[in-house]
Image (cartoon, rainbow, N blue to C red):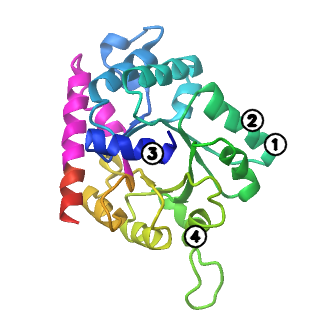
Amino acid sequence: MLFTEMLEDSFIKNDSMLCVGLDPDPKKFPAIFQDKKDSIFEFCSRIVDATYDTVIAYKPQIAYFSSNRAEEQLERLINHIKKVAPTVPIILDAKRGDIGATSEQYALEAFERYGADAVTLSPFMGFDSVEPYLRYPGKGVFLLCRTSNPGGDDFQNQRLSQLAGSPYLYEHIAELAQNKWNTNGQLGLVVGATYPKEIENVRRVAPGLPLLIPGIGAQGGDAIATVRAARTPTKGAHAVINSSRAILYASSDKDFDKAARDKAIETKNLLNSALNLA
């Protein structure tokens, strides 16, 4: 299946726009995982087992694994997700962005080593840094567009020129992704839930692209405003709305996986209510 088809299938099957971000921090794990050799895999796999029927996608953040020398555990985790939830797509949050030859290696890492269904990239170095990922048939690519961090204003929210009505840089990225750059039909955009007005602008410029939206939950983004801003004329897998810490660390007790499931269901239902009201 194409990545976009996987998103749509998961959206329908699980009735969900919720993406659970897998950002494992061993310091925050329940005491039962302390000093356990494969604690990152064990913790994350239990989160997956508790939530796989509530989500549209999973988004492992590679830095949390590599900083803990846990790349092998990430490989095992992705294989585990594919086993228990084969129709739920996996978005590797890597935010890569480098020259073409190096991008070829990063693409191989994301799609062949880890077996991810999609990856996040920085478009700052231009199309030749993105193109190697688009050679993989059916694989998804999410370009950073209007991110949820305050420092995003430094570049993304600057106009291309001083002329009245000149587009912002993030709008230019959205236009390229919607049209010229979307050579495999699997491009999407990363936009932060902390900027719902900018999400509306991105949706206007790129009406046909899936949006990966971090920032709800611990980062304080308004879930209802996010869904309304990201909506498309027809109901579909138009928004992949990520929550990480609020779900992963819903409880520090041994029932953490049950608490994670309860929080995932609560968040899923909130997003669906907003979609029905949009």
Circles 2 and 1: CB atoms closer than 8 Å:
yes
Q: Amino acid at mark 1?
A: Ala
Q: Amino acid at mark 3?
A: Glu
> Is 267 positioned to the left or the right of 213 in the image?
left
Disc 2 versus disc 3: distance between alpha carbons?
A: 26 Å
User: Depth-wise, is mark 4 or mark 3 nearer the camera?
Assistant: 3
Secondary structure character of the magenta stretch overall: helix
Q: Is residue 268 magenta?
A: yes
Marked residue nearer the N-terminal end (1 or 3): 3
Disc 2 versus disc 1: distance between alpha carbons?
A: 7 Å
State the residue position of label 3.
5
Disc 2 versus disc 4: distance between alpha carbons?
A: 27 Å
Locate residue 199: give its quadrant. bottom left
The number of numbered badges drawn on the structure is: 4
Q: Amino acid at mark 4?
A: Glu
State the residue position of label 4.
175
Circles 4 and 3: CB atoms closer than 8 Å:
no
Whether residue 243 is visible, yes or no, is no
Circles 2 and 4: CB atoms closer than 8 Å:
no
SS under mark 2: helix
Residue 192 picture location, percent across and down: 43, 57
Marked residue nearer the N-terminal end (1 or 4): 1
User: Depth-wise, is mark 1 or mark 3 nearer the camera?
Assistant: 3
Q: Is residue 10 above or below residue 260?
A: below
State the residue position of label 1.
101
Q: Which mark is residue 105?
A: 2
